[in-house]
Every structure is written in structure tokens, then in C-alpha cells.
């Protein structure tokens, strides 16, 4: 059932949740986040499993999610992505939230927890391609994270749904920004691990990138080829093919 609250109630609820998060927080965890590219100034230090448990307890509450996002803390933004209602999540909201991404974790968690959900998938395939062309670091990363996540979660999608993503990967692979190139690499590997046919396309793409005069493109290629050519991946995909 859709939950509806007054603005005062929602604001009060947000502050109650922040107080609870502070009790759950680990100061050492927050301080150490800078080592992995997370801004400690916006982090309380609550680990993701704790946020997931709290999100499950709260349940779907879109109005609360909007207010939690605006609160601007790492934990409230990730929690917002967990309790937002995919059915009420519009393209406009996705654009707004993407423009607020300030590190890889909030970007990735929002894509995984909300943007890739089935009610949004028809829109998200094209949105992933659009975002992959954007200049903003974490909007661009989000485009490739969505490609990677769709490759994992949209089990029934045909290969043709993923074929256009190779063009985006090749086009953007020379972006030297660390979080962008890692997002591109993630997308290439996950698409390649869907089946043997897409693996062949991913390997071909990686071999093309390996010849680029770009350290980012060569890194993306080498890392992807290491996994896609591994015995474990090849054998798993062959077994998957046999079961069809």
C-alpha cells in the first residue's frame, strides 16, 4: 500500500532515522572510507548490510525516500535508494538523483537498488546509453554500471539488447578517469559473461581496445580479457550452452 505522510512527519522521520544511523555508525569505518574513494565528510560509517536491514524494516516508502535523499548523507542516500518505489520513480527523478552522485558507491548502490528494477528496465536500456555519453564522471559511470547490472539481472533479455552497448564501450574507453574506466570494464566483463556469443563479442571488443593509444583502454582490455579468457568462465558458459 502506498504510504502518505505530512511534510512535518516525513522530516521528523528522517531525523529519527539519522539518529538511529548514528547509533549504528562505526567511526573507524567512516574514517577509512577515504581510502576507497568515499567522502568521509558525508559518511557516518554504517556498513551496507546494516543499511539493507534497515531498508527492509522500513519497507517501500517513496515520500520518505525523497526526503532521505535530500538529507545528503551517504547513508541516507543509499537508504533512499532502498525504500524508493520503482513504480513512482520517473525519468525526471532518475536524472535528478544521478546529478547528485558524488562518489562511486552512491552511484552504484542507487543503480543496483532502484534504477535497474523491472518497472524501469524498458526506460533504462536507453538511459544507460544516454548517460554513457555524459561528461559528468558519476553520471557517465552510472550508464556503464546500469549496463553491467542489466547483464546480470535481466535474465530473459535477448543478445540484441546488449549489442549496442559495445559501441558505447568502444567510444568511451579512452576516458582516463578511474571510476569511469572501472565502470566501462565492469560492463564489458558482465556482458561477456552472459553467454558464449556475447563473450566472443566482448573479447573482440577488448582486443580492439588493446590496440588503442590509451592507457585506460588498454587497462580495460587487459582486465576484461583476463577474466573472459579464464578457464572457469569459458567452461561455465559452455555448460550453460549445453543446458539450453
Image (cartoon, rainbow, N blue to C red):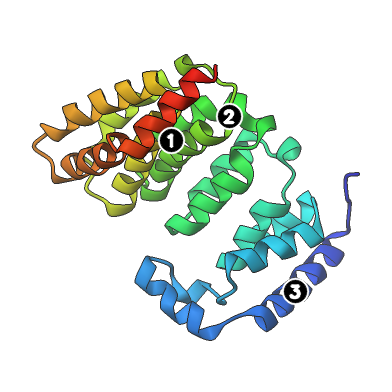
Is residue 101 placed above or below 93 in the rendered structure? below
Q: Secondary structure at mark 2?
A: loop
Quadrant for the N terminus, please: top right
Mark 1 burial class by Cα count in 10 Å: few <14, some 14-19, many 20+? many
Residue drawn where x is 49% and y is 25% of the image: 240
Numbered circle sitting on residue 131: 1
In the picture of the structure, the residue carrying the numbered disc 2 is 154
**Residue 95 position in % (x across, y down):** 55, 41
Residue drawn where x is 34% and y is 52% of the image: 179
**Residue 82 position in % (x across, y down):** 68, 53
| Sequence-wise first label, 3 or 2 | 3
- State which quadrant residue 25 falls in: bottom right
Number of the front mark, 3 or 2: 2
Numbered circle sitting on residue 15: 3
Total numbered labels: 3
31 or 65: nearer the eye? 31
Amino acid at each position: 500500500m502506498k504510504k502518505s505522510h505530512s511534510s512535518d512527519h516525513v522530516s521528523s522521520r528522517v531525523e529519527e532515522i539519522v539518529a538511529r544511523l548514528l547509533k549504528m555508525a562505526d567511526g573507524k569505518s567512516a574514517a577509512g572510507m577515504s581510502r576507497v574513494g568515499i567522502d568521509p565528510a558525508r559518511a557516518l560509517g554504517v556498513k551496507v548490510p546494516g543499511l539493507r536491514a534497515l531498508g527492509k524494516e522500513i519497507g517501500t516508502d517513496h515520500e520518505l525516500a525523497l526526503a532521505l535523499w535530500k538529507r545528503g548523507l551517504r547513508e541516507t542516500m543509499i537508504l533512499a535508494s532502498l525504500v524508493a518505489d520503482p513504480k513512482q520513480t520517473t525519468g525526471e527523478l532518475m536524472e535528478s538523483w544521478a546529478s547528485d552522485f558524488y562518489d562511486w558507491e552512491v552511484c552504484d548502490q542507487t543503480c543496483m537498488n532502484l534504477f535497474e528494477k523491472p518497472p524501469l528496465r524498458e526506460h533504462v536500456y536507453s538511459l544507460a546509453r544516454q548517460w554513457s555519453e555524459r561528461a559528468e564522471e558519476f553520471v557517465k559511470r552510472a550508464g556503464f554500471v546500469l549496463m553491467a547490472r542489466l547483464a546480470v539481472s535481466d535474465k530473459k533479455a535477448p543478445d540484441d539488447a546488449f549489442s549496442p552497448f559495445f559501441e558505447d564501450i568502444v567510444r568511451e574507453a579512452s576516458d582516463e578517469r578511474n571510476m569511469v574506466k572501472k565502470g566501462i570494464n565492469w560492463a564489458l566483463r558482465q556482458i561477456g559473461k552472459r553467454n558464449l556469443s556475447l563473450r566472443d563479442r566482448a573479447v573482440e571488443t577488448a582486443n580492439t581496445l588493446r590496440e588503442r593509444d590509451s592507457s585506460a583502454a588498454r587497462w580495460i582490455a587487459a582486465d576484461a580479457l583476463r577474466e573472459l579468457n579464464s578457464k572457469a568462465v569459458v567452461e561455465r558458459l559452455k555448460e550453460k550452452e549445453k543446458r539450453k
